[in-house]
Amino acid sequence: MDTRPLGTPLGTVGPEVSVVCLGAWPLGGGMGVIPDEQAISAIHAALDCGMTFIDTAEGYRTSESVLGKALRGRHDEVFLATKLSGDHSPEYMAEAIDNSLVSLGTDHVDLYQLHSPKPRWPIEETMAELLKLRDQGKIRYIGVSNFSGDQHREAARHGPISSSQPRYNMLFRGAEDDVLPACLELGIGVIAHSPLAKGILTGKYKPGHQFPDDDERSDHFVFREGRADRAWEVVPALQAWAADHGRDLVQLAIAWTLAHPSMASCIAGAKTAEQVLHNASAADWRLGESEMKELAEILAPVNLGV
């Protein structure tokens, strides 16, 4: 199985990346602590099946360090992305990238992203610092995450933005109003995060589900505010639609996200090699116009925003 690009690069002039990206948040313990051996097995499974785009962040617990262990001797196989999760002061940024490089066991990352906007620090100055890191050879491309449409436009005035990470999936479609059009306008490649809506679009979690304390979803706004419960207005119908097409809900959620014309890739998290391979199996499913219309009718009652 090969999940390498299906024709959409990362931005107008960006590099090619696998259309399904391994999201490494769960591998650092974000969904509960897992053994390093299990995480490393999942990472190797991704590389072996062609899922060579991996996304992490300095804020993902032990994710960067476990990736560093797994990628020893294999860095040349990976397009590696991480994110600046802390503040955007020049001092912090310089320290953060060096810490990430040490944890990841490399001298550069392919894509360095701002994890979220930090209005306290002018974006012009933040972009200038990112361009310095690029000129120093520590990063190759610059990306943003969780930015609004106007924040994308402002950042792009001060340097090249190759990628954007918005929350985007069948339940959270708010990015369609502002963010995705801005990315198309600016030639920024979208790598959607949360295509499975923190597990809601696996069909595993019924209303009222309680996560263990070591699972960050136990206090995530999607579950804390009851938004997840609303999803059950449409999840059974989506499961049935996927089954009618010989697939399951996980594969449908990934394929649906990838169908948007702005998408370069989507970031699917996994905790096991089996989950990695299952996520990868959605890469070859192209949903047509008539299928998307059918799904839009099912989804119409529920849009949980951004």
Image (tube, helix red, strand yellow):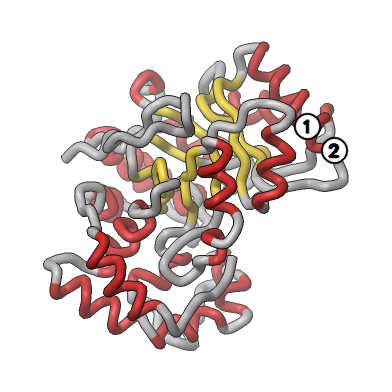
Most foreground residue, 66 or 202: 202
Residue 84, position as x, y percentages in the image: 67, 38
- Which label was assigned to residue 122? 2
Mark 1 and mark 2 in contact? Answer it, CB < 8 Å. Answer: yes
Residue 31, position as x, y percentages in the image: 49, 61
Most foreground residue, 135 or 205: 135
| SS at circle 1 | helix
Label 2 crowd (10 A; few <14 / some 14-19 / many >=20) = few
Kindly identify which residue carries mark 1.
126
Q: Quadrant of residue 89?
A: top right
Q: Is residue 116 visible?
A: yes
Report the number of discs. 2
| SS at circle 2 | loop
Query: Which residue, as the protein is rendered here, is positioned at the far right?
Result: 120
Residue type at mark 1 is Thr
Residue 96, position as x, y percentages in the image: 71, 31
